[in-house]
Image: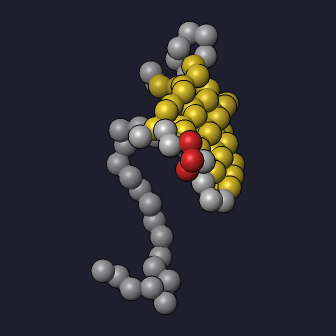
Amino acid sequence: MLNYLIILNEDNTKILHLKLDDVDINQHRTCDISYSDHTSYGKFQFPQYRDISIVANNKLEIHMEVKEFGFDEPLKYTFAIPKAGKRK
């Protein structure tokens, strides 16, 4: 079970911060996510920057910048399978 906190901007159109905490305080597990630089995309507000901090036994920090995104479009990923890899 988790306790959670969501912080929205003044007009409730953008998520600015999300905090998740384990209900069992003895576990000391938490996740903080901050969203910034929202871009309008049709009817959506999409955050291009995310800072994620996860704490359990260790701490993991992730700083993410989304450079390209789309909604309701077919996925188009092109990549080559490395020679050491196998196709399933």
Residue 50 sits above or below residue 55 on the image: above
Which part of the image, by quadrant, shows the C terminus? bottom left
Identify which residue, 4 or 52, lies in the foreground: 4
Q: How many marks?
A: 0
Q: Tell me: 16 left or right of 43.
A: right
How does the figure colour the protein chain or chains?
secondary structure
Which residue of the protein is positioned furthest toward the left in this rendering? Answer: 88
Residue 2 sits above or below residue 81 on the image: above
Residue 77 percent coordinates (x, y): 44, 60
Identify which residue, 32 or 58, lies in the foreground: 58
Residue 85 percent coordinates (x, y): 45, 85
- Give me the residue at 61% from left, 10% from top: 10
Which residue of the protein is positioned furthest toward the bottom in this rendering? Answer: 84
- Give me the residue at 41% from left, 40% from top: 1
Residue 79 percent coordinates (x, y): 48, 70
Residue 31 percent coordinates (x, y): 59, 43
Identify which residue, 62 or 76, lies in the foreground: 62
- Give me the residue at 47% from left, 76% from top: 80
Residue 28 sits above or below residue 15 on the image: below
Residue 61 can be seen, yes or no: yes
- Give me the residue at 53% from left, 14% from top: 12
Which residue of the protein is positioned furthest toward the front in this rendering? Answer: 26
Residue 64 can be seen, yes or no: no
